[in-house]
Image (spheres, grey):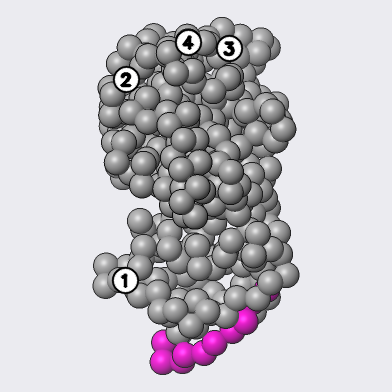
Amino acid sequence: MSGRDLFCQPRRFGRGAALTLVFASVLVAGAATGSLPGPDRKPSDGATRSDAAAVRHEDLAEVAAEAIAAGKSPMEAAERAVSRSGDRWGAVYSEGEYEEFEEALDGEYTGVGLWARRERDGRIEVTKVRPGSPAAAAGIRAGDRLRSVDGAKVDGRPVTEVVSLLRGDATDAPAGTAVKVGLERGKRAWDLTLRRAVLSTDSVTVRELADGVTVIRIASFTKGSGDAVRSAVRQSPAATGIVLDLRGNSGGLVTEAVTAASAFLDGGLVATYDVDGDQRALHAEPGGDTTRPLVALVDGGTMSAAELLTGALQDRGRAVVVGTRTFGKGSVQMPSRLPDGSVAELTVGHYRTPSGRAVDGMGITPDLEADRGVLGRAETVLSGLGES
């Protein structure tokens, strides 16, 4: 999984009794508001038995109870049940892993501040170091090779496994705990001990191009990202175009995606979705900028909540979408806690764009296909929109 950031992507289990609406990535599935699915509910239209209700939360509760009675792990028993269910996005996570997801959705994560990718030869290379992070303070640079984490060699491992080693479990490895990393730079090899810290995700960044075009990049939909987008739109130069960069955005809180949509729409439908057959809708707030020329950039890493936003802007005729076909993650997951504190998430439905298009397994096709020089293409499109 080349180019993935070295921190877990957003997930969310709602605090207290409420569940927070989430659509998420390959690493992250989401929870939809509402009650847990009842035993008499049926899959919604378009949902297959292997993708919805193949195993229910009630089933997992029984599996967990049987595991406890037999002196076995409820989490491991639930993992086996979900694995056999055929639910593509179903998963079971430890209590610590879910706490990490909560941190991430709050715009924070515990880690050392490294981004990395796996090269073709299997080596793990640092691609970016966060300023002010433990990694930056230790002198680690982009281009350094990461050889080991706490004595475990990382060559050939998926980046997601390296993430897990660096971050540890939120319960056992909070901020302040140490992690030993082995590094290599040219012919030099050395070991460092870093102390994990709570870092900001900086999910929304803004820059202005030479021609006055404002580029708003949303890396993920964490808490406050929707308002950050609205603020960026208000503060951008008047009568200039905006590029909304959603490339590589793997999802997050769908409520934040709806807020971001509200920056460009004057109310109206953003998406519809179903939770185990019950149909629901998401609407933008009124008062958004509906006249500023807008281009949305997408690629195969644009997923879930980012696809929901893209579909809304495209269907409502608000933006020209440029790039390559998006990933196609349009299913809804519902979480529930097991007796040992772990969390199981199962697919309970799907969402659709305002025109009724299904996203799951299909993705969104751009208005203008481009895999190179995408930003330049976006500027050309904006110039044409401005002239019209």
Whether residue 160 is situated above or below residue 385 in the rendered picture: below
Residue 122 picture location, percent across and down: 30, 71
Q: Quadrant of the N terminus?
A: bottom left
Q: CA distance from mark 3 to mark 4?
A: 17 Å
Task: Using residue 375 as the reference point, say whether residue 260 is left or right of it.
Answer: right
| Location of residue 114 (image quadrant) | bottom right
* Amino acid beneath label 2: Ala
* Amino acid beneath label 3: His
Residue 7 picture location, percent across and down: 54, 56
Q: Nearer the viewer, residue 78 or 370?
A: 78
Q: Which residue is mark 4?
A: 278
Mark 4 surroundings: few (<14), some (14-19) or many (≥20) residues within 10 A: some
In magenta segment, residue 99: no
Mark 3 surroundings: few (<14), some (14-19) or many (≥20) residues within 10 A: some
Residue 375 picture location, percent across and down: 42, 40
Tell me which numbered mark, 3 or 1, is placed earlier along the sequence.
Answer: 1
Tell me which numbered mark, 2 or 4, is placed earlier along the sequence.
Answer: 2
Mark 1 surroundings: few (<14), some (14-19) or many (≥20) residues within 10 A: few
**Secondary element type, mark 4:** strand
Q: CA distance from mark 3 to mark 2?
A: 23 Å
* Amino acid beneath label 1: Gly
Tell me which numbered mark, 3 or 2, is placed earlier along the sequence.
Answer: 2
- The mark closer to the camera, 3 or 2, is 2
**Secondary element type, mark 1:** loop
**Secondary element type, mark 3:** strand
Task: Using residue 51 as the reference point, say whether residue 15 is left or right of it.
Answer: right
Query: Where are the magenta residues, as a range?
Result: 186-195
- The mark closer to the camera, 1 or 2, is 2
> Label for residue 156?
1
Q: CA distance from mark 4 to mark 1?
A: 44 Å
